[in-house]
Image: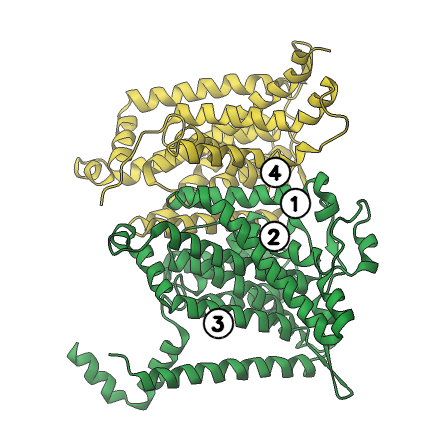
Chain colours: A green, B yellow
Amino acid sequence: MIDKQATKRKNLISLIAVLAFLALVLALDQIIKPTSRMYMLLTVLQKGSVYALAAVSMNLLNGFTGLFSLGHAGFMLIGAYTYAIFSIPSDARDTVYQYFDAAVRISFPELLGNALGGFGTALGVLISVLLAGLVAAVFAYLIGLPVLRLKSDYLAIATLGFAEIIRAIFQWKKLGPVTNGSNLLKNFARCSTFKLELGGTTLSLSTFVPVLIATVCIAVIVLLVNSTYGRAFKAIRDDEVAAEAMGINLARHKMLSFCTSCFFAGVSGASMAMVLSIAQANNFKSAMTYEILLMVVLGGIGSISGSVIGAMLFISASEWWLRGLDSGTFLGINAPDVFRNGFRLVVFSIIIMIVVLFFRKGIMGDRELPEVLGNLLRRHASKPAVKEAQGNE
Amino acid sequence: MNLWNTVLPYILSGISVGGQYALIAVGYTMVYGILRLINFAHGDVFMVAGLMMVYFAAAMPLYAAIPLMILLTVLLGFTIERVAYKPLRTAPRMSVMISAIGVSYLLQNLALYITGGLNKNYPEIPWISDKITVFGATTTRVTVITPFLTVVLVFALVFLINNTKIGMAMRAVSKDFETAELMGIRINNVISATFVIGTFLAAVGSLLFFSNYPGIVPTSGAMPGLKAFVAAVFGGIGSIPGAVVGAFIIGISESLIKGLDTILLTRGLIAEQMDFSTFSDAVTFVLLIVILVFKPTGLFGEKTTDKV
C-alpha cells in the first residue's frame, strides 16, 4: 500500500534537505578562505562531489543493472577531454597546443560569454558539460553494441580493455591537433575562476558549481532508478532469464543503462577537469576505475546514498584525515620513520580489504539514507511500538 | 635490406615477451578454470616478485636470492588465497572479484610505500643478460631462452595435470565444484595447489621479464598482468595450451605494433612517423574484443551452455 500523502511529504523533505545542503555549500564557499585550516573541507567537497557522481553512475550499472563494467575511467577521460577542448578560450589556445595546430577553434563559454555576458559564460560551460556527457554516451553506444552481449567477467575485462584503447587513442600524436597528444590540456574555464557578481559583492562559486552539477545529476539518476526503467534494471540484475520472460527487452535496457551511466561518467569527467584545472589522459588509468569501484563497495552496492557517502569518506580519508600518516605525525604520535610517504594508502587499502571481507554489504547495504534515518527517528520516537512490531514477525 | 631482416628482430622479441606472458597467463587460466575468478592481484604478485628480487640481490648472492624470491612469492600467492578469497567461497562472484581488486590495490600501495615510488633497478643476472646474435639480429640471451623455458615448464605442468593425483583432482574441481567435493576431494588443498603453481610460474616469469627491462615501479605488474589475462581469454580460458598460444600471439602482435613505424618506413609504405607504438598496449585489447565478439570461448575454449 502506498500512501500518496506520505510519499509527497517525503519528497518535499528530501527536496528541502537538498536545497539546504546546496545553500550550506554556497555559504561555506564564501566563509572559508584559502588560508584557513578548514580549506581542506572545500577541496574534499569539490573532489568528493566529482567522485560521488562517478561512483553513483557506476553503481547504476554495477549495482542496479548487474552489468559489471570496468570502463569508467575511459568514459570520464572522454568527458574531461570534450569539456576541456570546447572551453579553451581563443587567446590561450596557442599556448596550450604548443606543438600542434589546434583543430577545434570554438569555445562555448567564450562565445556565449561575449554575446550574453556573465550568463552566457555559465550557459557555455553548461553546454560544454552536456556535450562531454553526450560524447561519452555516443562512445558508450558504439562500444556497447559488441560488448553488452558478454556476461559478467568477460564484460568486465572487455570494458576495461576499451578504456585502455580510448586512452591510447587520445594520446596518439596524429590526433594532436584535437587532443594535444600526450600533453595536458589547461587554461580552460575552471572552478577557481567561477564567480558571481551580485550588487557589488563577488560570490565565489568554486565549490558550489561541482557540487551543484553532482547534485542535479544524482537527482536525475535517483528519478531514473525509481521509474519503471529502474525497476526493469533491477529485474535484469536479479534474474536475466526471468526478466526476459516478463517481457523486458534485455538488449534495449542494458544499452540504456550503459549509455546513461556513461553519460554521467562523462559529466563527472568534465567536472573533474573543472576541479583539477587540467585534463591529461595519463590520469585516467584503470587504477581510477578500481578506486571508484572500491568507493561503491564501501558505500554498499545498490545504494545511491551509499555511493555518495562512500565517495565522500574515501576522499576525506585519503585527502584529509589520514594525511598525517604521510607526513610524520598522526594522532599526536610522531614517528617519521613509519609515517612516511605512502603509508596513508597502505592503511587505507587495509581498511578497504576489511570492508570487502567482513562487511560485504558496505555502509548502507542496499538501503537508502532517508529510509535509514526514518527508521532511526521512529525507533527513538516510539520504542515500544518497534518492539511490538518485531514481536509480530 | 629485405623484409625478413626488418621484421625478424620484432618477431624475436615478440616471442620472448610472449613467453613471459605465457608464464603469467597460465596462473590466470588455472585459477579461472577452478574458481571462475579473474585474479586481478596476479599481475601485482608478479611485480612483488620482481621487487623482492631487487632487495634480495642487494643483500645476498644470486644463487640464494633466486630460490628465496620464488619461495616467498609462492607463499604470498598461497596467503592471498587463504586470506582474501577463501572466506568468500560462497559469496557471489562479483564479491570475490572485488576482493581481488582490493588485494591488487593493497599490493601496489604497499610497494609504493616500501620503494617510495622510485624506479628500482633490476639486478643484472650474469649469463642470461649477455648479448648474443641470432640470425643477424643482436639480442640478449634471455630473449632466446625464454620461449624454450616456457615450453618446458608448460609441458611439465600439462604432465602434472594429466598424470598425477593432484592434477586429476584439479581437473575434477574445474569440471564441477560440488560433485568433486562430494567425491572426497579436498577443495581447499586443490585450490591452494593451483595458486602455488600459478605464483611459481609468475615468479619465474618475473625473473625473465624484468631482466629485459630497466626497472620496476609499483604499477609495473598491472599491464603485463592484464595482457596475460587477455592471452588466457584469447586462448580459451581454462585451457593451458590455449593460454600459451594466446600469449605468444599477443606478444608478437604487440612487438610488431611497436616496430610498425620502422617497418613501414623502411619498406617505403609511409612517408613519416605515424606513432603507431602508442597503440602497443591497446592492440592487446583490440584482439581481445575481436575474439570475444566472434568466438567468445576463445581459440581452444569449450562451448558452454547456460542452464536456467
In what quadrant of the picture does the N terminus of chain A appear? bottom left
Q: Amino acid at mark 1?
A: Phe
Subunit ID for the residue under disc 2: A
Characterize the local packing of mark 3: few (<14), some (14-19) or many (20 or more) Cα atoms within 10 angstroms.
Answer: some
Residue B55: mark:
4
Which of the pair A313/A358 is nearer the observer? A313
Subunit ID for the residue under disc 1: A
For the residue labelled by badge 4, is the local secondary structure a helix, a strand or a loop? helix
Which of the pair A251/A371 is nearer the observer? A251
Characterize the local packing of mark 1: few (<14), some (14-19) or many (20 or more) Cα atoms within 10 angstroms.
Answer: many
Q: Residue at x 70, y 55 (%)?
A: A85
Residue A78: mark:
2
Characterize the local packing of mark 4: few (<14), some (14-19) or many (20 or more) Cα atoms within 10 angstroms.
Answer: some
For the residue labelled by badge 3, is the local secondary structure a helix, a strand or a loop? helix
Q: Where is residue A111 drawn, in percent x and y?
A: 75, 65
Instruction: Confirm or deny contact between disc 2 and disc 1 (CB under 8 A).
Output: yes
Picture quadrant of residue A365: bottom left
Q: How many angstroms separate mark 1 from mark 3 (CA)?
A: 31 Å
Q: Earlier in the sequence, mark 1 or mark 3?
A: 1
Q: How many angstroms separate mark 2 from mark 4 (CA)?
A: 40 Å
Subunit ID for the residue under disc 3: A
Q: Which residue is mark 3?
A: A219
Q: Are marks 2 and 4 on the same chain?
A: no
Q: Which residue is mark 1?
A: A170
Q: Amino acid at mark 4?
A: Tyr
Q: Amino acid at mark 3?
A: Ala
Q: How many angstroms separate mark 2 from mark 1 (CA)?
A: 9 Å
Q: How many angstroms separate mark 3 from mark 4 (CA)?
A: 52 Å
Give the vertical position of A16 relative to B87 (above or below).
Answer: below
Q: Earlier in the sequence, mark 2 or mark 1?
A: 2
- Foreground mark, 1 or 4, reads 1
- Foreground mark, 2 or 4, reads 2
